[in-house]
Image (tube, rainbow, N blue to C red):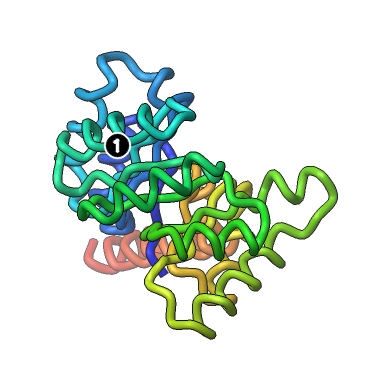
Amino acid sequence: MKLFLDTANLAHIKKFNQMGVVDGVTTNPSLVAKEPGEFEEIIAAICHEVKGDVSAEVVSTDFDGMLTEGRHLSAIAPNVVVKIPMIPEGLRATKAISQSGIRVNMTLVFSANQGLLAAKAGASFVSPFIGRLDDIGQRGMSLVEDLVKIRDNYHMKAEVLVGSIRHPQHVLEAAKIGADIATMPTEVMEKMMQHPLTDSGLKRFLDDWEKAKKAKASITV
């Protein structure tokens, strides 16, 4: 499964990219607005740092606006994926944009029916938002299960990109189900690396090493 970071913070992206664990990045207008600089410059810098897919979202909600923005965003870098909301005009724009060779990430998917329509319209990525479903008392991972089954049943080209991830367990569950991608905030990827037994085990090894060195030194003297 590919792991994406859901952020527009270049310093955070560089940190994890140097570890070799970042396959791509997803952004949205809210995330980009938090960072200094012009929108296009931020997206271009991320695309330069990460060679994988980088999602940049349109802000228009009408067909013509999304079409214009989508073409503009795709021209920033070859690895830009245009992010379009799952609305009727968004489906129409997805069809038009994808037919011109531009890849689309259809976002704000909250039902399997929406995901099926997104894939039919030509989206390269379908993004279910599982955390927001959990917030209203539904099991978000059930949506991922449905989308993965539909993808496998009909050999659809659209990849299931799990978004709105809140904790490492979400990543693990998505991987076990067979999702193609999980995109997460940097703090979730940070937590994925951590385990108290790793910390205590390392401390023990280092403590034993220091004791061994002191013992050898006393023998030498």
Query: Looking at this rendering, what residue extends furthest in the bottom direction?
Result: 153
Query: Looking at this rendering, what residue extends furthest in the right direction?
Result: 137
**Helix, strand or loop under label 1:** helix
Quadrant location of the C terminus in the rendered image:
bottom left
- Quadrant in the rendering for residue 207: bottom left
Vertical comparison of 27 with 54: above or below: above
Quadrant location of the N terminus in the rendered image:
bottom left
Left or right of 94? Residue 91 is right
Image position, residue 118 (x, y; %):
49, 57
Identified at 58% across, 54% down, the residue is: 128
Residue 207 seen in the current view: no
| Other-residue count near label 1 (Cα within 10 Å), few / some / many at <14 / 14–19 / ≥20 | many
Total numbered badges shown on the rendered structure:
1
Relative to the observer, which residue lies in front, 221 or 140? 140
Identified at 15% across, 40% down, the residue is: 77
Residue 140 seen in the current view: yes
Vertical comparison of 2 with 77: above or below: below
Residue identifier under label 1 = 70
Left or right of 56? Residue 112 is right
Relative to the observer, which residue lies in front, 87 or 139? 87
- Quadrant in the rendering for residue 2: bottom left
Identified at 71% across, 58% down, the residue is: 140
Relative to the observer, which residue lies in front, 93 or 10? 93
Image position, residue 33 (x, y; %):
41, 18
Relative to the observer, which residue lies in front, 135 or 71? 71
Left or right of 35? Residue 88 is right
Identified at 59% across, 76% down, the residue is: 177
Residue type, label 1: Gly
Image position, residue 95 (x, y; %):
37, 53
Image position, residue 102 (x, y; %):
24, 50
